Every structure is written in structure tokens, then in C-alpha cells.
């Protein structure tokens, strides 16, 4: 069974904070039910390239989840409705649970002995600079604006747009689905596969809330605000997605072209996901701008890769 992403939930105009909270009650899960160490023999036997890809992705996901578990608190406190506050409180539980899952899984299969907080610091040191910039600088700055003035509705809608729609809807969900597909093809990591299905289901609710919040902003005269915020956030998310710090491990033309096709598909999927969220929120008029800004951000990140490594990016093999 592949990972579950409920697009209908995300795009449905009937989705509300109340319905999302009730869905959270029905879909709850526990990390204690996952025997994470059971995957260790298969994890240790992975082919080197797959091992490196999966570990790097899980480290990035762990760092992102730990960060948002901390950054979400001001958005809970400053939510514009009680229903939104109740829902966001449930999401705070999700983010903490996701952090515990990714950190716990990595510690179990890697055989790490340091305590969780020390392992979290190690993961942060291994994460890309782009990931740290997105969560510990850009998103932190936005949630800090809300913390300093909880009555600043513009700040709240801008932060939710970045967090739920761009970072979770265009980045996290696409990365999670890519990892889940790689794990499915591998067929040897059932505990990781189950945990990823649970996380992806949770993220569908989070993105659904973000689309609701953007729609609510549009209906209350903030169309320009949230549209501009989407465009402002795109370069940060694309930089993480492209990952210019990570060099392609092979120079074989056939492998490079295959990698280029894989990346092209992933980037296009992320862009198209963001376009769907924006349209569902009632911002059809920014489609062309989203596409233009996305492409420009891709080109800058690819150029950064080529400057760093002195070789063409695999995506160039498709030209």
C-alpha cells in the first residue's frame, strides 16, 4: 500500500478547522506501536546509494519537524477563531509525534546510543544549510512576529501561508511521498513504511488547514497579503528541494540522466502541488507568477550547485 495523501481533503471548500480536528481524533496513532528496531537488519544491508539518500532525507525531515514543533506555538495562541486554536493544538501534538518518530527511527536503525536531544543536535549539524535557513531563520522570523504581537492578523496569515501551504504543502509532502515510494520499491523496511503513511496522513490535514486559512484571508480582504507571501517563500523552499550542497554521486551519463529525470519529476510535482493549493484558496490569478518565481528559484539553486561542485547539475542532461 502506498502513502495516502488526501487531495480531496486539502482542496474541499467544506474542510474546516472543526472537521480537521474531528479527523485528527479518528486518525490518531502512537510511535510506541512501531517496533522501529525491527527494521535495523534491512537498514544496515541497504545499497550505499539508497542508504545515503534515505538517511539524508530522514535527517532533513527530523530537523524540520523538531523546528516546527517549537515554532507552531505562537500560531496556536494567536489563532483568529477558537476552532482554529483547537485544531492547531492537535497539530502541535502531530509535530511532536513526528519528531519522536523520525529521531527514534534513526536512532534505532543506526544503533545510536546518545539521548534523543543529543541525536537531534547531531541531525541538525548534518542537515543542509538551506534547511536550517528555512526553519531556523525565515520561518522563525515569521512566527516571532506573531509571538511579539498576537493581535497582528496579517502576521498570522503570512506565517500560516508559509508554514502550512508552502513548506508543508509544496516541500514536506513531496519529500515524504518520494521517500515513501523509495521505501515501497525497496520492500524491506515495513516499520518505516507504516510510519511514513501515518505522517503523510497527518500532513494532509495540516495542508488542508493552511488552504482553509488562506481562503479565510482572501475572504477577509487579505488576497494580496497571502499571494505575496507565497511568492516570497518559494525561493527558500526550492533551495531546500534542489539541495545544491548535495553532489550527485555518479558521473555515468546514463545514471546522471536518470537522476535528472527523477529530480525534474520531483520539482514539477512540488510546483504543481503548490499551484493546486493556491487555486483551492481562490488565488487563481497568481498562477503565472508562482510558475515564474519557481523557475527562477530553481535556476539560482542549480547555478549554486554548479558553482559549488564545478560540474553540470544532472538536470542539465535533459536539455
Image (cartoon, rainbow, N blue to C red):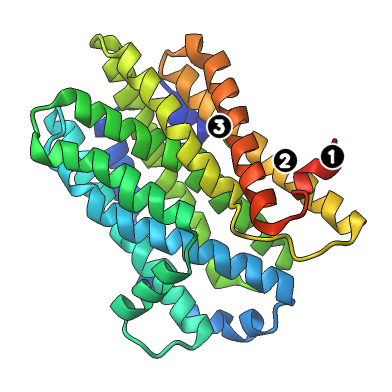
Q: Are marks 1 and 3 in contact (CB under 8 Å)?
A: no
In the drawing, what numbered circle is on residue 264? 2
Quadrant containing the N terminus is bottom right
Q: Residue at x 44, y 81 (%)?
A: 107
Q: Are marks 1 and 2 in contact (CB under 8 Å)?
A: yes
142 versus 55 height, above or below: above
Secondary structure of the residue carrying tag 1 is helix
Task: Return the residue nearer the eye: 202 or 178.
Answer: 178
Please name which of the two marks, 1 or 3, marks the residue nearer to the observer: 1
Is residue 90 in view? yes
Q: Which residue is mark 3?
A: 273
Q: Which residue is mark 1?
A: 318
Please name which of the two marks, 1 or 2, marks the residue nearer to the observer: 1
Q: Is residue 182 left or right of residue 61?
A: right
Quarter of the image where one finds residue 75: top left
Q: Residue at x 69, y 50 (%)?
A: 306
Please name which of the two marks, 3 or 2, marks the residue nearer to the observer: 2
Q: Is residue 192 left or right of residue 144?
A: right
CA separation in Å, label 1 and label 2: 9 Å
Task: Return the residue nearer the eye: 91 or 118.
Answer: 118
Quarter of the image where one finds residue 156: top left
Amino acid at each position: 500500500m502506498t502513502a495516502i495523501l488526501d487531495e480531496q481533503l486539502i482542496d474541499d471548500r467544506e474542510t474546516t478547522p472543526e472537521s480537521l480536528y474531528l479527523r485528527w481524533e479518528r486518525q490518531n496513532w502512537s510511535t510506541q506501536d512501531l517496533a522501529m528496531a525491527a527494521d535495523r537488519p534491512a537498514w544496515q544491508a541497504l545499497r550505499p546509494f539508497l542508504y545515503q539518500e534515505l538517511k539524508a532525507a530522514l535527517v532533513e525531515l527530523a530537523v524540520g519537524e523538531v523546528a516546527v514543533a517549537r515554532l507552531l506555538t505562537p500560531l496556536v495562541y494567536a489563532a483568529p477563531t477558537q476552532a482554529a486554536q483547537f485544531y492547531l493544538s492537535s497539530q502541535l501534538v502531530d509535530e511532536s509525534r513526528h519528531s519522536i518518530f523520525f529521531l527514534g527511527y534513526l536512532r534505532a536503525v543506526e544503533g545510536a546510543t546518545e539521548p534523543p536531544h543529543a541525536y537531534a543536535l547531531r541531525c541538525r549539524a548534518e542537515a543542509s544549510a538551506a534547511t536550517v535557513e528555512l526553519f531556523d531563520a525565515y520561518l522563525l522570523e515569521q512566527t516571532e512576529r506573531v509571538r511579539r504581537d498576537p493581535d497582528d492578523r496579517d502576521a498570522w496569515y503570512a506565517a500560516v501561508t508559509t508554514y502550512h501551504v508552502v513548506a508543508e504543502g509544496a516541500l514536506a509532502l513531496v519529500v515524504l511521498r518520494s521517500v515513501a515510494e523509495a521505501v515501497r520499491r525497496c520492500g524491506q523496511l515495513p516499520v518505516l513504511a507504516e510510519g511514513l503513511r501515518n505522517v503523510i496522513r497527518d500532513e494532509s490535514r495540516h495542508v488542508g488547514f493552511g488552504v482553509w486559512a488562506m481562503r479565510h484571508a482572501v475572504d477577509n480582504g487579505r488576497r494580496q497579503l497571502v499571494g505575496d507571501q507565497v511568492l516570497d517563500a518559494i525561493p527558500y523552499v526550492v533551495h531546500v528541494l534542489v539541495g545544491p550542497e548535495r553532489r550527485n554521486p555518479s558521473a555515468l551519463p546514463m545514471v546522471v540522466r536518470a537522476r535528472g529525470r527523477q529530480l525534474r519529476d520531483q520539482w514539477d510535482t512540488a510546483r504543481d502541488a503548490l499551484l493546486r493549493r493556491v487555486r483551492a484558496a481562490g488565488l487563481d490569478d497568481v498562477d503565472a507568477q508562482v510558475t515564474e518565481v519557481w523557475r527562477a528559484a530553481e535556476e539560482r539553486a542549480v547555478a549554486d550547485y554548479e558553482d559549488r561542485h564545478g560540474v553540470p547539475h544532472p538536470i542539465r542532461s535533459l536539455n
